Amino acid sequence: MESIHCIDCGGYITNTRHVEYRSRLARPQAAPLRYAACSCAKPTLYMPVFHTSARGRLAYCDAPSAAE
């Protein structure tokens, strides 16, 4: 069975009810894994990556940005 580890402290998450999610761009490197429970007030995980078709990715990439 796989365990879920916090990207901030590296500890395993025992309660997944109160987790926060971050993109990999916000914190590209996770903390090294350790075999102790997570000690963070709100454990943090990477945001799940949803796979889309090539057509969906092209439409998203071609959309004008808010800065323009």
Image: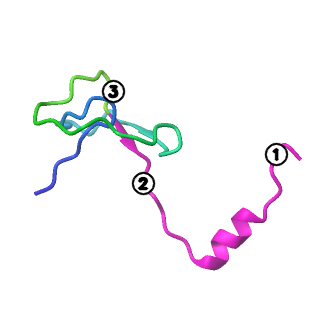
Q: Within 10 angstroms of label 1, few (less than 14), some, or many (20 or more) residues?
A: few
**Mark 2 residue element:** loop
Q: Amino acid at mark 2?
A: Pro
Q: Could you tell me how far apart the alpha carbons at marks 2 and 1 are, in whole angstroms?
A: 24 Å
Q: Residue at x 46, y 58 (%)?
A: 49
Write down the region rendered in magenta: 44-68
N-term-proximal mark, 1 vs 3? 3
What is the x, y in percent for residue 19? 34, 35
Q: Which mark is residue 42?
A: 3
> Which residue appears at 40% of the width and 45% of the height?
46
Q: Nearer the viewer, residue 17 or 11?
A: 11
Front residue of 21 and 16: 21
Question: Quick one: quadrant of the N terminus?
Answer: bottom left
Residue type highlighted by circle 1: Ala
Is residue 58 shown left or right of residue 11?
right
Label 3 vs 2, first from the N-terminus? 3
Residue 62, relative to residue 65: is it above or below? below
Query: Which residue does the numbered mark 1 point to in the structure image?
Result: 66
- Mark 3 Cα-neighbour bin, 10 Å: few <14, some 14–19, many ≥20: some
Q: Residue at x 55, y 71 (%)?
A: 52
Q: Identify the coloring.
A: rainbow
At label 3, the amino acid type is Lys
The residue sitting at the right extreme is 68
- Residue at left 70%, top 72%? 58
Q: Determine whether, in the image, residue 13 is placed left or right of residue 60.
A: left
Q: Please tell me in which quadrant of the rendered image residue 17 appears.
A: top left
Tell whether 55 sits left or right of 15: right
Q: Is residue 67 above or below residue 8?
A: below
**Image disc number at residue 41:** none
Q: Secondary structure at mark 1?
A: loop
- How many angstroms separate mark 3 from mark 2 (CA)? 17 Å
The residue identified by callout 2 is 48
